[in-house]
Amino acid sequence: MVPMLSLWLPVLLAAVLVLVASSVIHMVLGYHADDFAGLPNEEGVMDALRPFGLPPGEYCFPKANSMKQMGEPEFVAKMKKGPVAFLTVLPSGTPNMGGQLLQWFVYSVVVGFFAAYIAGHALGPGADYLAVFRFTGATAFMCYTVAGWQASIWYKRAWSTTLKNTFDGLVYACLTAGAFGWLWPS
């Protein structure tokens, strides 16, 4: 077993590497540019929603308040008439990317912490690079990707987007695993 305190450096390095890699993926490579489709009449939809003053949050419509209501003819008619949607409303104004990047970094530290915890309990000091890579990489991959698959299953996110996010998670997992393999205590 390896104490968690001796793994703080690979946890932080992995988080920095993931932050840099995700920045390159989203700002330079651009393959996520078509993850969201635009609306055919964006201004019209925005003008129609604006008077409701929707606070930031997640919404769905039509929304049933119970399983019983989902079977009622009025609700079924609303579903058939459409549109049926999940809607995420963000705060108005210029996005605060600094706050989001900080949250992403903290999230990456938490992923590194879980990778350190699992590998630290499974392996001892001086463990083989590939053994460290396997344990930390598999843990990081699960953290960065698997929960995201639910969005395609339940909320109809395009599987192409989920597969791109899964590829990103594989990159992040390999960087995390490499940092741990390199800095694993002797």
Image: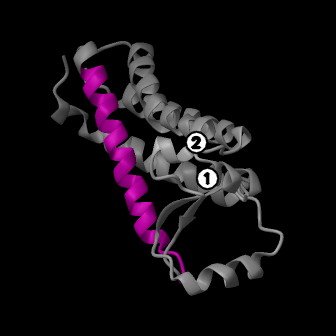
Give the main secondary structure of the magenta stretch: helix
Q: Give yes or no for contact between labels 2 and 1 (Cβ–Cβ under 8 Å).
A: yes
Q: Which residues are magenta?
A: 93-120
State which quarter of the image contains the N terminus. Answer: top left
Total tally of numbered discs in the picture: 2
Q: Residue at x 38, y 19 (%)?
A: 132
Q: Amino acid at mark 1?
A: Phe
Quadrant where the C terminus is found in the figure:
top left
Q: Where's residue 5, x and y in %?
A: 16, 35
In the image, is residue 105 part of the stretch drawn in magenta? yes
At which x and y percent is residue 52? 54, 82
- Residue at x 83% of width, y 69% of height: 40
Q: Position of residue 165 (x, y in %)?
A: 61, 41
Identified at 45% across, 75% down, the residue is 55
Q: Which residue is mark 1?
A: 75
Instruction: Say which amino acid is labelled 2.
Output: Gly
> Of the numbered discs in the image, which one, if any, rests on residue 71?
2
Question: Does residue 38 appear left or right of residue 17 in this picture?
Answer: right
Up-down relation of residue 165 to residue 85 (above or below): above
Say if residue 2 shows up in the picture: yes
How dense is the environment of label 1, judged by Cα within 10 Å: few (below 14), some, or many (20 and up)? some
* Left or right side of 57 for 21: right
Residue 96 falls left or right of residue 126: right
**In this picture, is 154 found above or below 29?**
above
